[in-house]
Structure formats: C-alpha cells, structure tokens
Image (spheres, helix red, strand yellow):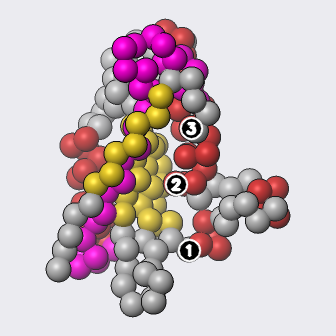
Amino acid sequence: MAHLHFHRTVYKGGGQAARGRVTYIAREAQRAAVRQLTYVAGEERGDLVETGSRNLPAWSQGNAATYFQAAEQYEAKRSIAWTAFEEWKITLPRELTQRQNTVLMESLLAVIAGDRLPLTYALHCPSTLDGQHAQPHLHLLISARQQDGIERSPAQHF
C-alpha cells in the first residue's frame, strides 16, 4: 500500500549547512572525505537515480553549493524569519516503476518551483535493510528568492 511522508527542514541565515546538504543529496563526496570514511560516495551507495539544479542565478555558475552558501550568508538577520533555504524530503510510491517516479518527480519540480524558484534536487532509491523493497524519495533544497530575470550580485539577490 502506498504511503506518503513529507518532512520539511528550515535552514537559517548565518548557518553553515549548505555545502554539506548539497554534497549529501547529490552524493558528491570529496575524495578526502571518502578516504577518511566520513561519507560514502554515490557510486558506492548506488541509490542516486537523478540529481540536478534549476533556476540558479548566473553568479552561482550553476553550482548549487555556491548558491545555498550565499543564501546562508546573506539571509542572516535580513528578514524576520532568517530562513536561508528549506529542505523537503518527499517519499514517492514504491508501487511505481523508477521511470514513473522520475516522471512524478519532474511534475513535482514543475509545480513547486516552476521556472522561478532556485532549487537543487536528488531522487534516491535505496533498498530496505532486508533488500526486499525500494524506498524512492526526493530531496529538494529550495529557496524562496524568485528569479525575475534581473541580474544581481549575491548580496542584492538575497
């Protein structure tokens, strides 16, 4: 039977979680961290299905860690909520095929962010501990700062 789980984590301005979150969800471990056994890279974990970023401003040069680190830096105390970005974790139905879950993910990204909200995403599909079932889920790092087509510096963007 399909079930839904949604978990939202808010990261505040002034924090230092961005690089770690981007690295974790995209399974982009640095080789030094792998040698120290602090993180298992995506190729060893084998659960990464797809990852990418959308709607990042030009100054980030397509690098999600650069964007979300700037969010942490420049959102600090500039707004009442101090929210730099949010991470959403959404389970996807294990009854669907991987292709169907990928299509569902694309639909969710279009509805949630459209062509305006900066985000990075990763679709993971690990197995349960007993290896009997898939556990497909989506990670989204998302910013509320909408793209409006006007180029700004990081400080002006936030």
Q: Amino acid type of disc 2?
A: Ile
Mark 1 and mark 3 lie on one chain; the one further toward the N terminus is 3
Residue drawn at x 31%, y 71% as measured from the top left = 99
Decide: few, some or many residues near mark 3? Use Cα within 10 Å; few <14, some 14-19, many ≥20: many
Q: Which residue is mark 3?
A: 18
Image mark for residue 25: 2
Q: Which residues are magenta?
A: 69-98
Mark 2 and mark 3 lie on one chain; the one further toward the N terminus is 3
Expressed as whole percent of the image width and height from the top left, the position of residue 146 reads: 34, 23
Question: Visible in this render: residue 151?
Answer: no
Element at label 2: helix
Residue drawn at x 37%, y 58% as measured from the top left = 138
Q: CB of mark 1 within 8 Å of CB of mark 2?
A: no
Q: Nearer the viewer, residue 120 or 10?
A: 10
**Left or right side of 83 for 29:** right
Q: Amino acid type of disc 1?
A: Gly
Decide: few, some or many residues near mark 1? Use Cα within 10 Å; few <14, some 14-19, many ≥20: some
Residue drawn at x 66%, y 64% as measured from the top left = 41
Residue drawn at x 36%, y 54% as measured from the top left = 89
Q: Amino acid type of disc 3?
A: Ala
Image mark for residue 46: 1
Q: Is residue 34 above or below residue 73?
A: below
Q: Is residue 110 above or below residue 122?
A: above
Question: Visible in this render: residue 158?
Answer: yes
Expressed as whole percent of the image width and height from the top left, the position of residue 154 reads: 54, 16
Mark 1 and mark 2 lie on one chain; the one further toward the N terminus is 2
Q: CB of mark 1 within 8 Å of CB of mark 3?
A: no
